[in-house]
């Protein structure tokens, strides 16, 4: 009998423990079981493509999302801040969620489900947006865009961000978990490059060429296609897993493409431009006159009578102050086209004068030709450019300049109300020239800080200023306020134009120069310009004034 003692093989720290839970499927380790390096290479290319596209899709959704929010809340700094903030938080949550899921269930098919879920939500965004109320006081200046961004964009941004940790796990798996740092760096690089491409592509190509609805459809489809590929990668006998999402995505995309949105009552034209949600509307006044108006996002920008082309908005008559204060009118510049009622009226009354219009949105100029008689006035010359850039490049001097490049009260570009801008305007005026600008504000009271800051800034550059209120008898109410600034002391007392009926009305709306300035009034500069805070205070105090 053999009594030889045989050594017992004890487990060591180098030996793998048996998994006490459910068995690990082959699908949970897709790369370590791959028989060839060729499959590893193809998988790495697929993962890199997914990473790039997820970064691009996130930024496309974010930038195009602003065009969905602008008709509701205006294209203001608050809309952008809320949108960017929500997307950043969603990305951080997605990064954490993706890391947790990659450790718990690292199957490549789960990556496909994340992409398909992001795709489905992206396709639903235009429909979900239609459920939100159109801009009014109840939306809130800050809470409105914040809540809308959470509702529309947080989910797809979170799901797309969760893709990154998955790809780090699987990229390192194709190399036997020996290059985890390199895999993480590669994912970060590709995601950032994809975000850059998505940003440039959306801003320079997609928004100018396609409607916002189509942008979301194409982005959702691209994300869905790559999700289906990830779901089907090296799977056999599971065709239902792939056919169901394909059918769902096809149905959602077809519903978008076949759906023809109907224009609201009174709207004769609507389009999404690079800058605005643009609408041309027609209505009948209480006196039975037909009026055609232009609305950009939430703001009524201009209007004219359809039959005559005459001015229908009182605030647009104030360009005629130039007839009172300017000794000659041979040229005029309008910063902001609106409905082109003012430059056309100027050209009609002074047919030999040059009338230039600087309008940042080329689509507004096209609408002016199609709906607002612009082609009937050959002396009116529109230019599609930012007002400050136009003045910086211009070498011509004008008898008057009318500044109306603001979209209501919500959207007042800070670079067009700074001292440096007013100095530039002054340099483009003739020696007897005047500058007029239209602002919405109370004339006096604690909420008139914006108006008084603009007046104070103008006085720092111009020798003389005067203020006119469309509703001057109620100075505490928000209204169109026209501020006039002249290079020298104006002499208008004996001018025949001052006896015109319209001119007498305009001059009668002048308010006192000795108004008490509220606390917080300051001179705006390019370096310090708290105009957005002043606008927010005014809108909260007068929510009914929100356009």
Image (tube, grey):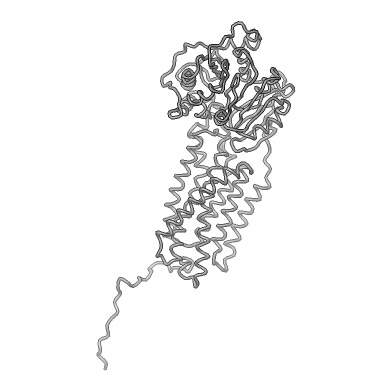
In this picture, is 295 found above or below 347? below
Seen in the image, is 346 located left or right of residue 119? right
Q: Residue at x 65, y 8 (%)?
A: 496
Q: Quadrant of residue 358?
A: top right
Q: Position of residue 206 (x, y in %)?
A: 60, 45
Q: Residue at x 56, y 26 (%)?
A: 408
Q: Position of residue 456 (x, y in %)?
A: 46, 19
Q: Is residue 447 visible from the viewing direction of this image?
A: no
Q: In the rendered image, which quarter contains the N terminus?
A: bottom left
In the image, 303 versus 110, the foreground residue is: 303
**How many numbered discs, if any?**
0
Q: Is residue 132 visible from the viewing direction of this image?
A: yes
In this picture, is 227 found above or below 423? below
Q: Residue at x 53, y 11 (%)?
A: 489
Seen in the image, is 5 located left or right of residue 535? left
Q: Quadrant of residue 374?
A: top right
Residue furthest to the bottom in view is 1
In the image, 389 versus 442, the foreground residue is: 389
In this picture, is 45 found above or below 313? below
In this picture, is 124 found above or below 38? above
Q: Position of residue 491 (x, y in %)?
A: 57, 9
Q: Position of residue 327 (x, y in %)?
A: 61, 12
């Amino acid at each position: 009998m053999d009594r030889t003692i045989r050594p017992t093989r004890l487990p060591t720290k180098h030996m793998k423990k048996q998994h006490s839970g459910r068995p690990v499927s082959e699908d949970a380790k897709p790369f370590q079981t791959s028989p060839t390096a060729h499959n590893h290479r193809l998988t790495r290319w697929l993962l890199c493509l997914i990473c790039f596209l997820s970064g691009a899709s996130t930024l496309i959704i974010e930038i195009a999302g602003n065009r969905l929010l602008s008709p509701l809340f205006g294209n203001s700094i608050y809309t952008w801040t809320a949108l960017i903030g929500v997307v950043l938080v969603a990305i951080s949550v997605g990064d954490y969620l993706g890391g947790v899921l990659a450790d718990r269930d690292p199957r490549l098919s789960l990556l496909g489900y994340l992409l398909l879920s992001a795709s489905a939500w992206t396709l639903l965004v235009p429909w979900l947006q239609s459920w939100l109320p159109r801009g009014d006081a109840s939306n809130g200046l800050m809470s409105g865009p914040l809540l809308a961004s959470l509702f529309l964009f947080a989910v797809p941004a979170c799901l797309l961000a969760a893709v990154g940790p998955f790809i780090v796990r699987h990229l390192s798996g194709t190399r036997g978990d020996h290059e985890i740092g390199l895999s993480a760096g590669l994912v970060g690089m590709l995601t950032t490059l994809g975000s850059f491409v998505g940003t440039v592509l959306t801003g320079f190509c997609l928004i100018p060429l396609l409607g916002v609805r189509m942008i979301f459809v194409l982005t959702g489809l691209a994300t869905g296609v790559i999700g289906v590929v990830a779901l089907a990668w090296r799977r056999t006998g599971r065709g239902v897993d792939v056919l169901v999402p394909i059918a769902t995505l096809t149905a959602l995309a077809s519903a978008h493409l076949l759906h023809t949105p109907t224009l609201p009552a009174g709207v004769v034209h609507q389009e999404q431009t690079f800058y605005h949600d643009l609408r041309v509307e027609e209505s009948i006044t209480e006196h039975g006159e037909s009026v055609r108006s232009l609305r950009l996002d939430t703001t009524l920008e201009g209007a004219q009578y359809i039959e005559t082309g005459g001015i229908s908005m009182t605030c647009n008559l104030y360009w005629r102050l130039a007839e009172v204060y300017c000794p000659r009118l041979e040229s005029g510049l309008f910063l902001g086209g609106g409905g082109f009622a003012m430059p056309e009226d100027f050209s009609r009354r002074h047919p030999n004068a040059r009338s230039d219009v600087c309008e940042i949105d080329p689509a507004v100029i096209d609408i002016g030709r199609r709906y607002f008689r612009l082609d009937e006035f050959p002396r009116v010359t529109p230019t599609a450019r930012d007002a400050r850039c136009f003045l910086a490049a211009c070498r011509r001097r004008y008898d008057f300049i009318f500044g109306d490049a603001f979209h209501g009260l919500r959207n007042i570009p800070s670079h067009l109300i700074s001292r440096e801008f007013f100095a530039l305007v002054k340099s483009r005026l003739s020696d007897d020239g005047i500058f007029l600008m239209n602002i919405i504000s109370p004339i006096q009271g604690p909420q008139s800080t914006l108006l008084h800051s603009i007046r104070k800034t103008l006085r720092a550059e111009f020798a003389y200023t005067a203020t006119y209120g469309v509703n001057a008898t109620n100075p505490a109410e928000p209204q169109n306020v026209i501020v006039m600034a002249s290079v020298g002391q104006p002499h208008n007392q004996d001018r025949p134009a001052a006896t015109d009926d319209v001119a007498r009305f305009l001059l009668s709306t002048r308010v006192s120069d000795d108004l008490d300035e509220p606390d917080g009034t300051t001179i705006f500069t390019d370096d310090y310009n708290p105009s957005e805070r002043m606008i927010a205070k005014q809108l909260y105090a007068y929510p009914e004034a929100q356009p």
